[in-house]
Amino acid sequence: MSAEEFLIPLDEEMLEYFREMVDVLVEHCGISRAEAVARINERYGQKEMSVLEQNLMTHEFPEFWAYGVYYLPDDEYRLPTGDADADAGIDFEQLPVRPAPPKDSPVWTLPDEPGA
């Protein structure tokens, strides 16, 4: 099963999880839903996830994976995890941001409309 926005085949549980990752990127990083999906597709779209990989992935907060597709590590090679205690020493405003995928890339499966 797959959803039209994601390039990777996802069952219902993983589809919900990936959509939660999109919500994190939209709400916490201030990017469009289209860009959030494109970033996730860029990272995971060519991957076939085993059941074990899916189970391991869902043992982390969606923020853990979402932040990894948006931010680059800080000077101490830390990325946010989605855990408030673990992230307390990370200055989100100073974290470098990964470049978005090129607009002509096939990972952009949703129109990138302002405010979308």
Image (cartoon, rainbow, N blue to C red):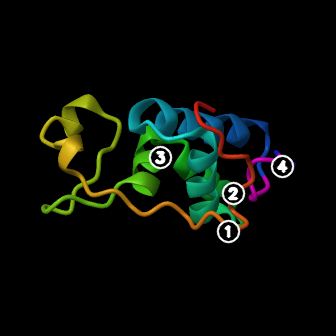
Distance from disc 4 to disc 1, alpha carbons, whole Å, reads: 19 Å
Mark 2–mark 3 contact, CB under 8 Å?
A: no
Element class at badge 1? loop
Q: Nearer the viewer, mark 2 or mark 3?
A: 2
Q: CA distance from mark 4 to mark 3?
A: 19 Å
Which quadrant of the structure image shows residue 45? bottom right
Residue picked out by circle 4: 2
Magenta residue span: 4-9
* Mark 4 or mark 2, earlier in chain: 4
How far apart are the alpha carbons under marks 3 and 1? 20 Å
Residue under label 1, please give it.
105
Quadrant in which the C terminus appears: top right
Residue 7 belongs to magenta span: yes
Left or right of 75: which side holds 27? right
Relative to the observer, which residue lies in front, 33 or 90? 33
Residue at the spot x=68%, y=34% of the render?
16
* 86 vs 50, nearest the viewer: 86
Q: Is residue 13 magenta?
A: no
Q: How many residues crowd mark 4 within 10 Å: few (<14), some (14–19), many (20+)?
A: few
Residue located 53% across and 51% down the image: 56
Q: Which mark is residue 108?
A: 2
Q: Which residue is mark 3?
A: 66
**Amino acid type of disc 4?**
Ser
> Closer to us: mark 4 or mark 1?
1
